[in-house]
Image (tube, helix red, strand yellow):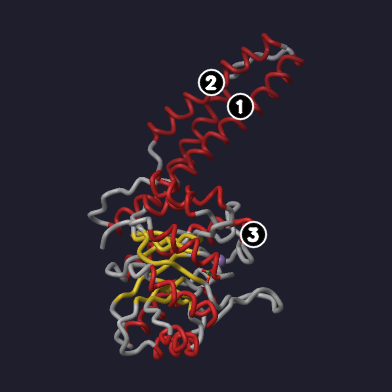
Amino acid sequence: MERPYIVAGPCSVESRGQLEAVTEALARLPQVRLVRCGVWKPRTHPGGFEGLGEEALAWMEALRQTHPAVRYCCEVALPEHVEAALRHGIDAFWIGARTTANPFLVQEVTEALRGTEATLLVKNAPSPDVELWAGAIERCRKVGLADILAVHRGFDMLRNQGYRNSPLWEVPIELRRRMPEVPILCDPSHIAGQRDRIEEVSQAALDMGFDGLMVEVHPSPDEALTDARQQITPAALETLLARLVVRRTDNASADMQLSLLRGQIDRLDQQLLQLCAARFDVVRQIADVKRQENMALFQPQRWDSLLSQHIAAGKELGLSEEFVKSLFEKIHTESIRIQHAHTQLS
Ligand code: PEP
Ligand code: MN
């Protein structure tokens, strides 16, 4: 598969003019393989904009006359959706997060696609459960679908680093380990939830060896009826695609794992630095007390007993004596230097 495989288009089709504008713009971008169009929107609360259904499908069908190279794809959550979309010549579909969570629906939707050559994208379920995601893909295979891709749209939970959906990269990495032949796209729009963080999520995904992206694109994002904050213009998509660095991957599974582990190292290093800074703050407070009480800065007995405690604790944790010794010698030297400098200043 040519990487990155890009799926782009509006969260929802809202008018014929909007669909025309986005189709024309995306038809010009060679990386865009599918134009995503939400025509039935799963809304958490009733009463909101729920998509235009068949009316939008008819516009998509008509626009394919003028843009024969464009391949549309729409979300299907019920067998009736599949039947209506097939009637309008749509041959690519995605199963949304809420549908993946329901094996009965996945079964019905995939049954409705039996015997077609459809492309089917399967989003992960909202909960961080690789089983539901893998199970939905297995159901697609059981009805004979061959062109199946997974889409990582993040998970609905609190641990989210300021994103709308938590990426929890370990879940798509586990899917890759189990099903290395299934391409995985990342949906940075629903993960980030805000357009200025789409690039960082997209680059992280490509660095991990994801095969492509599904991005929400709207001609006037701020006026969008759904997901306005996270949609970007076609021009912004073009800029994004030009900026992203696509790495060569010979072993996508190893790339994903390495990238996840490097992220953990980065976070741990940050914590190490913060801990050192916090420790040296305490050292300054100690210097104040010693100065007030007119005590010596360096107290060798305390240093010796601390060091042997640390060496013993380090051994429990599998850290060598040489390492613990040299680490604390460095920290101690810096503490003495800080105490001196602090005493001189005050
Ligand atoms: C969507 O793609 O517009 C959508 C509803 O996403 P999800 O199913 O990932 O919530
Ligand atoms: Mn959306």
- Cα separation between marks 1 and 3: 51 Å
Q: Earlier in the sequence, mark 1 or mark 3?
A: 3
Q: Residue 183, relative to residue 161: is it above or below? A: below
- Quarter-wise, where is residue 164 in the image? bottom right
Q: In the rendered view, would you say 161 is above or below 324?
A: below
Q: Quadrant of the C terminus?
A: top right
Q: Which mark is residue 334?
A: 2
> Along the line of sight, which residue is nearer the eye, 211 or 6?
6
Helix, strand or loop under label 3: helix
Q: Position of residue 21 (x, y in %)?
A: 50, 61
Q: Residues within 10 Å of mark 1 (few under 14, many from 20)?
A: some
Q: Earlier in the sequence, mark 2 or mark 1?
A: 1
Picture residue at 57% right of the left edge, 23% below the top: 301
Q: Disc 2 vs disc 3: which is toward the camera? A: 3
Image coords of residue 169 (percent x, y): 44, 59
Residue bearing mark 3: 223
Give the alpha-carbon distance from disc 2 to disc 1, as whole Å: 8 Å
Disc 2 marks a residue whose amino acid type is: Glu
Q: Amino acid at mark 3?
A: Glu
